[in-house]
Image (cartoon, helix red, strand yellow):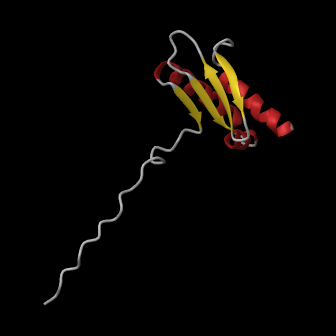
Amino acid sequence: MAARYDETAIAQEIVSVLPVEVARLCSDDRQSIRYAVRAEGLRLRSITLSRSSLRRLLGDEDREVKIEYLRRELVQYAGRRSEFRYPRPHPAAGVTRPATLELPLASTI
């Protein structure tokens, strides 16, 4: 149970950059911690933090620097995007490559 508390504490530390009444914990499951965001003038509507990534962050010696970076990134996202995810989804994750095109071999006559 202590690890769960630590993940939640780090999540709170990251989200604390937003005003208290803006971000509300809405889902706390095994894979992620989700917040709903409601505020005039903010485009941001949801924050999703991966528990496994937060656990890795717990043991990282550069934790404080990385948390500060995430906090700054969250503030930037608040005005521009509707969702903040940590870790960010890989751009190619949803892209599928086309099947290889098989051309007939030229015959040697």
The number of callouts visible is: 0
Q: Could you say where residue 68 lies in the image, as x and y percent from the top left?
A: 64, 28
What residue sits 46% from the left and 43% below the top? Answer: 91
Q: Please tell me which residue is depicted at 63% across the width and 14% down the height of the picture.
A: 22
The quarter of the rendered structure image containing the C terminus is bottom left
Residue 33, picture quadrant: top right
The image quarter containing residue 10 is top right
Which image quarter is the N terminus in? Answer: top right
Q: Residue furthest bottom?
A: 109
Query: What is the x, y in percent for residue 6?
Result: 80, 34
Quick one: which residue is furthest to the top in this view? 40
Give left or right: position of 32 versus 100. Answer: right
Task: Please say if 56 is above or below 36.
Answer: below
Q: Nearer the viewer, residue 92 or 98?
A: 98
Relative to 66, is 93 on the left or the right?
left
Answer left or right for 57 relative to 82.
right
Percent coordinates x, y for residue 105 in the rendering: 23, 79
Q: Nearer the viewer, residue 66 or 35?
A: 35
Question: In this rendering, is residue 86 above or below 74?
Answer: below
Using the image as rendered, state which of residue 65 and residue 70 is in the foreground: 70
Q: Is residue 92 left or right of residue 25?
A: left
Residue at 80% from the left image edge and 36% from the top image edge: 4
